[in-house]
Image (cartoon, rainbow, N blue to C red):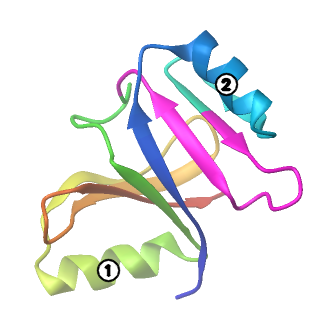
Amino acid sequence: MPVRRVMPVIRSEAAQENREFYGRLGLDEVMDLGWITMYASPSAPAAQVGFMTSDRTAPVDPDLSVEVDDVDAVHAAVRESGAEILHPLQDEEWGVRRFFVRDPDGRVVNVLSHR
């Protein structure tokens, strides 16, 4: 099950300040849904960081996102392992299919594939 990228998701209310700061570091804004903004390296697009006020479609906020080739297969493997699924597998309006799972240290992982 290939992984395409791993991205930290940082809770923040400083949208404009982050836009300016990370822009000065050379990262481009690649997504802004109002409640989550993502920045990526123009030369290495999988190098990303996200800032979120709170997740608008899930009961908890993720600590990181892992993009995989086949989210359905990963979901089945995670469910079979007995790991705690915090947000069910579902399609989101911004073009991803995702679910949330708790890792062994209690962190919330958003596992997704683009549709």
Query: Is residue 113 placed above or below 83 in the rendered structure?
Result: above
Residue count near mark 1 (Cα–Cα under 10 Å), binned few <14, some 14–19, many ≥20: few
Using the image as rendered, state which of residue 80 and residue 30 is in the foreground: 30
Q: Which mark is residue 8?
A: none
Q: Compare residues 63 and 20 and report the one nearer the observer.
A: 20
Task: Say whether residue 43 is left or right of residue 75.
Answer: right
Circle 1: element type: helix
- Name the residue located 64 percent from the left edge and 57 percent from the top edge: 114
Q: Looking at the picture, which amino acid does disc 2 mark?
A: Phe
Q: Which residue is mark 1?
A: 76
Q: Which residues are magenta?
A: 38-54
Q: Earlier in the sequence, mark 2 or mark 1?
A: 2
Q: Position of residue 75 (x, y in %)?
A: 35, 73
Q: Position of residue 34 (x, y in %)?
A: 57, 16
Residue 21 numbered mark, or none: 2
* Residue at the spot 23% in from the left edge and 37% down from the top edge: 60
